[in-house]
Image (tube, grey):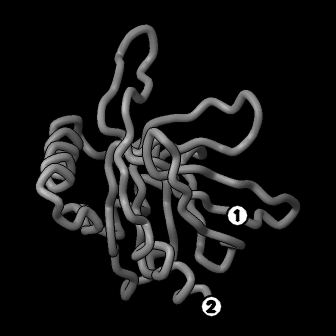
Amino acid sequence: MVDWDEQIKAHMFWIWGEEDGFMKRGKEGMLVITDRRLAFISKTEITYRAHDTHSRRQLNRFQAGENVFRPAEGYSIKNLEADLDKSPDNLEVPYRQILDISQEEKRWGTLLKVKINLGDKVKTMKFSVVRGWVKYPAKDPLEFQRMDWSSLISLVKTASG
């Protein structure tokens, strides 16, 4: 169900998301942050060309030291709903299900850790922004961005509290 007054606060591209645990394979996706939920989209309706354009803009903002937490032009709540319906692999987490959210500095970049209550179990997801990819034999991140996730963390804590 679409909640008409819900707003997209940020849309991050080139996100590497993985579940915490042994032998868990990560995947590329987008992180869509609204004022009510966080969504990790690995299968999307966005065209390759539009995705490439948004990804390059995000990279340019990183290089210029600009704010990267912003909505993508032309991507609405309706698009988010369509993407969430597209695949069960896409993850939607209402803020009330987030038990803990924090950032962790690693030697290779900054990690966002989100602990999620799924009712019968608790799952920890890790997200990081990719700077470059290796494409063969499988697409994998080569480098990661260093960034400050604190504005997202405070948004989640304020909205869920």
Percent coordinates x, y for residue 77 in the rendering: 35, 70
Question: Viewed as shown, does residue 145 lie left or right of 103?
Answer: left
Q: Describe the element under mark 2 as helix, strand or loop.
A: loop
Question: Viewed as shown, does residue 90 lie left or right of 109?
Answer: right
Percent coordinates x, y for residue 61 in the rendering: 16, 56
**Which residue lies under the disc numbered 1?**
116
User: 7 or 10, which lies in front?
Assistant: 10
Q: Is residue 2 visible to the viewer in this orientation of the structure?
A: yes
Q: Is residue 85 visible to the viewer in this orientation of the structure?
A: no
Say which residue appears at 51% left-offset and 53% top-offset. 105
Whole-angstrom CA distance, mark 2 to mark 1, is 15 Å
The three-letter code of the residue at mark 1 reads: Ile
Query: How many numbered circles does the render carry?
Result: 2
The three-letter code of the residue at mark 2 reads: Gly
Say which residue appears at 28% left-offset and 46% top-offset. 46
Q: Residue furthest top?
A: 137
10 Å crowding of disc 1: few (<14), some (14-19), many (20+): many
Percent coordinates x, y for residue 152 in the rendering: 44, 72
Q: Which mark is residue 161?
A: 2
